[in-house]
Image (tube, helix red, strand yellow):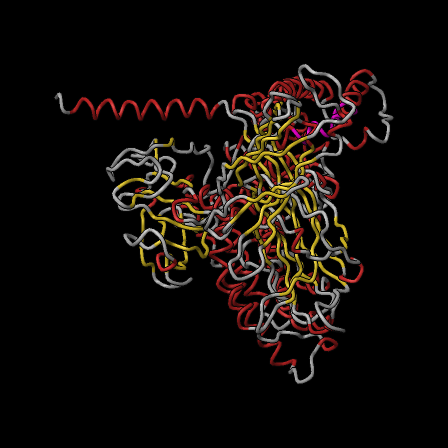
């Protein structure tokens, strides 16, 4: 037993460490950044070199956080005004100064050439949020392409020279946060550090001395203070360079620090963000063209979970409030009805807590009460339809992938002509052949949809069943309304939209080419009509174009109706399904990475190979290429930790490790966004595994020791605590605290409307005669003013408390000048 005691104590210490970390995590504030938007189009792109070169341009766009590329569009054919139409969304995992959009001309036998760029400071992103703007392209100047930060330590020392006079010395030491960097420090004379090879995080630890002379008029003989006018014009300029042996050194950035920030005997220590070179070349941006962008940058300060409990409880009891219009969730949708992004966090919160179906059923019932004709059921853009649309996008993601992705890939890759509009036919096209191609695709898509009921997620089936019952109850004399209530969502708002825009539903990585988009538009129109419920004459009358009218008549209407009816019955019946798409293996993420080969030398490119990494809710695999058989399969239940790897381990950025029952798997992602996404998803999928580690090694084991802690045992416990993974619903990817913070933000920004709604309730409760409401009041749905006013009062109390929590924690942000909050360096 004596031999087991040390092991037991070690296990207890590890468990205690994990508990301490969990407690610290509960009190932690998270700053979460995200960017959503669209690269719309460019116009009048200027020549890259030479005259009239724009006619030969095949261009593409990239997005960079500072100088790190995180997104790239596909290449567009020769055009001086290309339409990109690429949507993007990603979480931003680190601090940044600039968000930049580059336009490149694709090189055939040489490197890609920059046409121009749009760079927006992080602080200016809010000016453009949510709206489209045209931006003039600026020249891509090497001296302006900077990133990183430098840590400086400076002090003014009083010295007595050999002749007895009093003067001052400036002491400066620094480190840099790639490559082969060195520092050049300039005041009136220039001094240079040694070169640090093969690292982007060098630590120089070199000290330089500069003499700061006092003014000749100074007469004091005691303790010396430099007067403001003496040092007003003095500054230290620090340049960072990448040392090139055979070529010219590459500029990495600079910062300028005024000497007046210093005081005698006080050391100034701070991190500074590097800035572009002050004398960077300028040229007319009008010559380079412009870029139309739509951007929405969001930064959430997410508080500990306990802070959001009152708000969540108020929202989650909404389905039980009578009438539903007096509930907190309905009020939120009512006051923010112009802002479509408000509904999504509310839907996600309700989904996570299994409160979505009762809420949307109550909201749909309210809408049906105000619907006078069965043929207009769920046609508007109401709170009910928006909630169900967002739910289908979240819950039905894997359902779409299983049902439509193979045929969408076939359509996009085969590139068959399907144009049936005589006006748009190209020379040499045969309209009958095109019609046959289109008919084949439509029949294939239609069959896949109508045979997919077994893959429809149970939650969607529950909603459809509720809609069907509500519609029958509202219009008991109409035998068709039970089908139109369901088809208006599953065909018109789900499948038809996904066929039309596959890139918006992650079915394709990029916007399809114009010809493919046209084919998908024709298929979507036909599917939408085939799936709608109504008479043949009504369906035919929905087509304005004669060619579509003739094309639709080629389908056997009766057989199609029977298939649609059977499908709608299956996805909205009372029969509980035993299996669903969500219970099958769902691909959570896949992509190309660099994987380190196991058990070889520590350094050298031969140790890293390109591999296709793929994670589902059941296993992690890597393959030689996409679509090939797996080289290695790791059951996600065997994953014990997923953590970042120090750059020093292999001199590579964006690396992470998957610790499992065998040797750790070392992987390098393409950029910081990709690395963050892999860490998040792998961490979530393995969060509840037995045997999860409490500590890990941030470096690798080589040469008989761990490079991080120098422990010589390969089985030694980790030297750093593991990252605590936030609780989330993996398949729905929901972070409840973040959703609650988003809702609080929307409520706060609509405080005036909340006041107006309170006034409307008070007015209606006091004045019982015919309502003569101001126009502002008529925008609200108020059935029971007293109930609604009571909920508004509760919302107000919750918001005030949350705001107080924000105010008390706002001073806990990183100190200005720290590593996490560096000073924005001065530029010339």
Identify the residue at horizontal 50%, vertical 51% (top origin): 179
Q: Is residue 79 magenta?
A: no
Q: Position of residue 775 (x, y in %)?
A: 85, 31
Nearest the camera: 573 or 205?
205
Quarter that holds the C terminus: top right
Compared to residue 248, the image places residue 391 above or below, namely above
Quarter that holds the N terminus: top left
Identify the residue at horizontal 31%, vertical 47% (top origin): 635
Quarter of the view holding residue 188: top right
Identify the residue at horizontal 32%, vertical 55% (top origin): 597
Quarter of the view holding residue 257: top right
Q: Is residue 820 visible?
A: yes
Q: Position of residue 813 (x, y in %)?
A: 59, 26
Q: Position of residue 20 (x, y in %)?
A: 39, 22
User: Count of labels shown?
Assistant: 0
Q: Which residues are magenta?
A: 745-756
**Which residue sits furthest front?**
163
> Magenta region's main secondary structure?
helix
- Say left or right for 169 vs 573: right
């Amino acid at each position: 037993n004596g031999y087991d005691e040390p092991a037991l104590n070690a296990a207890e210490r590890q468990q205690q460490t994990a508990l301490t970390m969990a407690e610290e995590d509960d009190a932690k504030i998270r700053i979460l950044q995200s960017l959503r938007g669209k690269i719309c189009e460019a116009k009048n792109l200027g020549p890259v070199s030479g005259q009239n070169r724009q006619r030969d341009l095949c261009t593409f766009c990239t997005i960079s956080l500072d100088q790190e590329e995180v997104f790239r569009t596909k290449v567009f054919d020769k055009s001086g005004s290309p339409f990109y139409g690429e949507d993007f969304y990603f979480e931003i995992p680190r601090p940044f100064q600039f968000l930049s959009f580059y336009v490149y001309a694709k090189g055939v036998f040489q490197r890609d050439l920059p046409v121009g760029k749009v760079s927006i400071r992080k602080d200016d992103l809010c000016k453009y949020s949510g709206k489209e703007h045209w931006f003039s392209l600026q020249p891509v100047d090497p001296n302006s392409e900077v990133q990183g930060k430098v840590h400086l330590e400076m002090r003014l020392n009083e010295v007595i020279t050999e002749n007895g006079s009093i003067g001052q010395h400036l002491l400066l030491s620094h480190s840099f946060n790639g490559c082969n960097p060195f520092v050049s420090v300039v005041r009136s004379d220039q001094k240079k550090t040694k070169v640090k090879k093969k690292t982007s995080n060098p630590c120089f630890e070199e000290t330089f001395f500069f003499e700061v002379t006092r003014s000749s008029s100074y007469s004091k003989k005691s303790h010396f203070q430099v007067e403001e006018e003496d040092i007003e014009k003095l500054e230290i300029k620090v340049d960072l360079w990448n040392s090139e042996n055979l070529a010219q050194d590459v500029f990495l950035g600079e910062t300028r620090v005024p000497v007046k920030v210093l005081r005698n005997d006080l050391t100034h220590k701070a991190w500074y963000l590097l800035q572009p070179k002050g004398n960077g070349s300028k040229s007319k941006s009008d010559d380079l063209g412009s870029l139309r962008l739509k951007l929405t940058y969001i930064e959430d300060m997410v508080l500990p979970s306990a802070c959001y409990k009152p708000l969540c409880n108020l929202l989650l009891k909404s389905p039980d409030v009578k009438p539903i219009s007096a509930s907190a969730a309905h009020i939120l949708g009512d006051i923010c009805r112009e802002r479509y992004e408000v509904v999504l966090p509310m839907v996600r919160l309700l989904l996570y807590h299994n409160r979505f179906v009762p809420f949307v059923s109550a909201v749909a019932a309210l809408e049906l009460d105000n619907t006078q004709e069965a043929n207009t059921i769920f046609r508007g853009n109401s709170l009910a339809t928006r909630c169900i649309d967002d739910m289908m996008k979240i819950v039905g993601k894997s359902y779409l992938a299983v049902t439509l992705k193979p045929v969408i890939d076939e359509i996009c890759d085969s590139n068959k002509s399907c144009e049936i509009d005589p006006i748009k036919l190209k020379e040499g096209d045969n309209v009958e052949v095109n019609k046959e191609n289109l008919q084949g695709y439509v029949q294939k898509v239609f069959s896949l949809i109508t045979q997919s009921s077994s893959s429809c997620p149970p939650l969607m089936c529950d909603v459809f069943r509720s809609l069907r019952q509500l519609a029958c109850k509202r219009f008991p004399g109409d035998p068709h309304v039970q089908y139109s209530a369901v088809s208006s969502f599953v065909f018109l708002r789900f499948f038809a939209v996904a066929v039309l825009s596959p890139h918006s539903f992650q079915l394709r990585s990029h916007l399809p080419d114009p010809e493919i988009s046209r084919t998908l538009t024709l298929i979507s129109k036909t599917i939408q009509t085939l799936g709608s419920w109504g008479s043949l004459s009504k369906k035919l009358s929905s087509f304005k174009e004669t060619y579509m009218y003739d094309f639709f008549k080629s389908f056997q209407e009766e057989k199609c109706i029977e298939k649609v009816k059977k499908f709608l019955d299956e996805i909205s019946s009372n029969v509980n399904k035993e299996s669903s798409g969500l219970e099958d293996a769902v691909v959570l993420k896949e992509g190309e990475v660099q994987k380190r080969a196991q058990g070889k030398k520590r350094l050298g490119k031969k140790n890293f190979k390109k591999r296709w990494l793929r994670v589902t809710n059941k296993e992690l695999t890597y393959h030689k290429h996409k679509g090939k058989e797996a080289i290695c399969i790791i059951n996600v239940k065997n994953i014990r930790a997923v953590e970042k790897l120090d750059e020093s381990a292999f001199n590579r950025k964006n690396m992470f490790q998957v610790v499992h029952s065998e040797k750790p798997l070392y992987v390098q992602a393409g950029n910081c966004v990709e690395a963050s996404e892999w860490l998040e998803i792998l961490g979530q999928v393995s969060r509840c595994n037995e045997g999860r580690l409490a500590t890990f090694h941030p470096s690798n084991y080589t040469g008989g020791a761990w490079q991080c802690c120098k422990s010589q045992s390969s089985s030694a416990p980790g030297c750093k605590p593991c990252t605590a993974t936030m609780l989330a619903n993996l398949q729905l990817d929901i972070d409840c605290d973040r959703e609650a913070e988003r809702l609080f933000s929307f409520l706060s920004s609509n405080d005036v409307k909340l006041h107006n709604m309170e006034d409307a309730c008070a007015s209606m409760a006091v004045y019982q005669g015919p309502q003569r409401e101001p126009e502002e009041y008529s925008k609200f749905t108020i059935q029971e003013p007293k109930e609604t006013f009571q909920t508004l009062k509760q919302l107000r109390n919750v918001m005030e408390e949350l705001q107080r929590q924000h105010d008390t924690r706002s001073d806990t942000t990183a100190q200005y000048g720290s590593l996490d909050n560096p000073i924005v360096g001065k530029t010339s």
